[in-house]
């Protein structure tokens, strides 16, 4: 018997808030709980909802609390919630938050869920205070961690080299067109140039600029790699009943998927069949939608190779055809396959863990028709991906206008 | 000179036989006594069948480069003296893959599929790292 998996498509994103990304943050430093309260207030105002309406929250880390994060946030904001989650999926977290919120709503647990990820600098703390981040980035150097024992001692740390090794493996199996991966960065930059808040709004780049930029880890050039910035975002997800009293066009969550099997790519069975494959398959089948029905895609883009693999493994072209697909399609907001219409994190900015929210908020703006100069005409459906670690965990989301 | 100390492995009880073999310039890996699956890194239970009957077997340590990259910027300040870092994943002939670095080879000469053999790097701290060099 076939098991019916998933959502009925009755929960919608009804509010968003996003701090404009900044390469050099000039504003006041705020604790993450303070940023959480601020972002939540802005997102609720966008939705036209009141704090008393909130009965669910989804968070990630906050610097002020190592544990008991959801209850700390609920208390700080004065919320009483029936559903509280802390998501730990790296860059896949924001998409993971949104589908969890939708699922909790469809289960009937709650009606209004706020998801947020602050990403502005926090006040500097006295030296006796615990450090929030490991000096080895996303790798754990704590004794007993497999990374500490088998990866970090070789210098296999942070993300660049992991993605570079995936790109080289791709080159070996399917061939590599450096102009195609560079085109991803260049096309997305064209999109960023049409977004008033993008950190690179004033700086166009060409394929040749990308190829002439510094090589960081072969074959990845510096212009193919995200640079961190300050920012942050929040999203309000609400039930069908609540949607009626919100202000903006509801953006329904009709499909999602999530898949993960490794932390370090060394130990995965096939590094080129990425987790977004099964995640996307589930999302599209849940939404009962074909790839061709998607009007724009917002793909997590920590690196250009991430976008390439996400186009392929999400099923927009065949395996091994990604380079040709990118070369033959216009990925800009004016193009025949619009990708990361806000510029992606490569062009808009990567505000820490909130980086993945930039793809969610852009999908919402496109479906609402609020994307200004970069608006994709008649945008009804957007596909969003999230990626954490080194293609370690990936999440997929399909949103549709109501 | 980098002033940041290099991160070094700290073997735990479950992994000690692996490290102790490397000290004597041998490579041993875990193999499941119940289902014959090779396992790396070492664990307490088989990832395929959950058996605790994991046995240590010596292997040649020969393998091929599964993928690699040349890091032109240090991946962490501790590795500043090693740039360009020649990071690789090597697939051993029994099928498991290990994170490593390549030594004794010009970065321009490295290619995926290249046959490699162990190059035991004995540290002052009594830990030997399993690096690889062209066969
Ligand atoms: Zn077994």
Image (tube, rainbow, N blue to C red):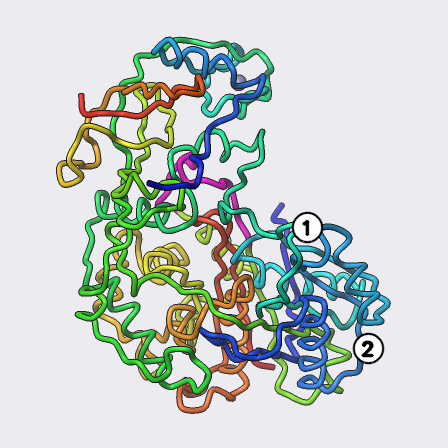
Work out whether mark 1 precedes mark 2 in sequence or the reverse, and give the earlier one: 2
In the picture, measured across the screen, residue B96 lies left or right of residue A254, that is left
Q: Which residues are magenta?
A: A258-273
Q: Quadrant of residue A109?
A: bottom right
Which residue appears farthest toward the left when viewing the image?
B109
Numbered tag placed on residue A22 in the rendering: none
Give how far across and how far down residue B21 sits, in percent.
42, 11
Give how far across and how far down residue A108 sits, in percent.
80, 64
Between A7 and B18, the one lying in front of the other is B18
Kindly report which numbered mark, 1 or 2, lies closer to the viewer in this rendering.
1
In the picture, measured across the screen, residue A49 lies left or right of residue A273, that is right
Q: Quadrant of residue A32?
A: bottom right
Q: Secondary structure at mark 1?
A: loop
Give how far across and how far down residue A188 sits, in percent.
34, 74
Give how far across and how far down residue A174 sits, in percent.
22, 48
Circle 2 is placed at which residue position?
Answer: A53
Q: Chain of mark 2?
A: A
Residue at image position (26%, 38%) is B86
Using a 10 Å C-alpha cutoff, classify the residue at mark 2 as few (fewer than 14 neighbours), some (14 to 19) or many (20 or more). some
- Answer yes or no: is residue B122 visible: yes
Q: CA distance from mark 1 to mark 2?
A: 39 Å
**Above/below status of A128 relative to B30:** below
Between A149 and A45, the one lying in front of the other is A149
Numbered tag placed on residue A128 in the rendering: 1
Q: Secondary structure at mark 2?
A: helix
Q: Quadrant of residue A237?
A: bottom right
In the picture, measured across the screen, residue B2 lies left or right of residue A42, that is left
Instruction: Please count the marks in the image.
Output: 2
Residue at image position (43%, 41%) is B4
**Above/below status of A221 relative to A278:** below
């Amino acid at each position: 018997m076939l098991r019916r998996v998933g959502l009925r498509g009755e929960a919608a994103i009804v509010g968003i808030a996003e701090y404009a990304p900044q390469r050099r943050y000039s504003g006041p430093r705020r604790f993450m709980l303070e940023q959480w309260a601020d972002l939540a207030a802005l997102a609720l105002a966008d939705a036209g909802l009141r704090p008393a309406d909130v009965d669910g929250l989804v968070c990630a880390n906050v610097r002020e609390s190592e544990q008991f994060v959801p209850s700390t946030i609920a208390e700080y904001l004065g919320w009483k919630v029936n559903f509280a989650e802390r998501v730990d999926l790296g860059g896949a977290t924001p998409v993971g938050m949104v589908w969890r919120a939708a699922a909790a709503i469809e289960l009937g647990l709650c009606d209004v869920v706020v998801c947020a990820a602050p990403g502005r600098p926090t006040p500097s703390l006295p030296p006796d205070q615990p450090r929030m981040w490991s000096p080895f980035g996303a790798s754990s150097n704590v004794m007993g961690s497999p990374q500490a024992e088998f990866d970090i001692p070789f210098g296999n740390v942070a993300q660049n080299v992991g993605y570079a090794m995936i790109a080289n493996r791709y080159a070996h199996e399917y061939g590599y067109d450096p102009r195609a991966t560079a085109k991803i960065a260049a096309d997305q930059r064209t999109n960023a140039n049409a977004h008033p808040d993008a950190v690179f709004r004033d700086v166009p780049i060409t394929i040749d600029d990308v190829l002439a930029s510094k090589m960081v880890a072969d074959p990845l050039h510096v212009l193919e790699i995200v640079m961190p910035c300050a920012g942050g975002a929040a999203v309000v997800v609400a039930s069908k009943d609540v949607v009626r009293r919100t202000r903006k066009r509801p953006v329904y969550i009709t499909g999602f998927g999530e898949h993960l099997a490794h932390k370090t790519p060394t130990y995965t069975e096939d590094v080129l069949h990425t987790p977004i494959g099964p995640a996307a398959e589930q999302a599209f089948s849940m939404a009962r939608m074909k790839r061709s029905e998607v009007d724009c895609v917002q793909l997590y883009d920590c690196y250009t190779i991430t976008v390439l693999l996400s186009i392929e493994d999400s099923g927009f072209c065949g395996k091994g055809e990604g380079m040709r697909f990118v070369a033959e399609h216009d990925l800009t907001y004016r193009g025949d396959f619009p990708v990361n219409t806000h510029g992606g994190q490569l062009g808009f900015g990567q505000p820490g863990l909130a980086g993945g929210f930039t793809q969610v908020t852009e999908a919402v703006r496109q479906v609402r028709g609020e994307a200004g100069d970069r608006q994709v005409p008649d945008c009804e459906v957007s596909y969003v991906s999230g990626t954490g670690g080194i293609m370690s965990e990936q999440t997929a989301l399909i949103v549709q206008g109501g | 000179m980098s002033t940041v100390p290099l991160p070094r492995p700290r073997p735990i009880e479950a992994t000690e036989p692996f490290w102790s073999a490397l000290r004597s310039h041998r490579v041993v890996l875990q193999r499941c006594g119940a289902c014959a699956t090779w396992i790396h890194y070492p664990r307490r239970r088989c990832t395929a069948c959950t058996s605790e009957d994991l046995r240590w077997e010596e292997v040649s340590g020969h393998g091929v480069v599964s993928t690699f990259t040349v890091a032109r910027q240090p991946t962490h300040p501790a590795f500043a003296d090693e740039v360009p870092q020649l990071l690789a994943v090597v697939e051993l002939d029994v099928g498991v893959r290990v994170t490593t670095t390549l030594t004794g080879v010009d970065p321009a000469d490295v290619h995926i599929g290249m046959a490699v053999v162990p190059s035991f790097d004995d540290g002052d701290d009594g830990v030997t790292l399993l690096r690889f060099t062209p066969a």
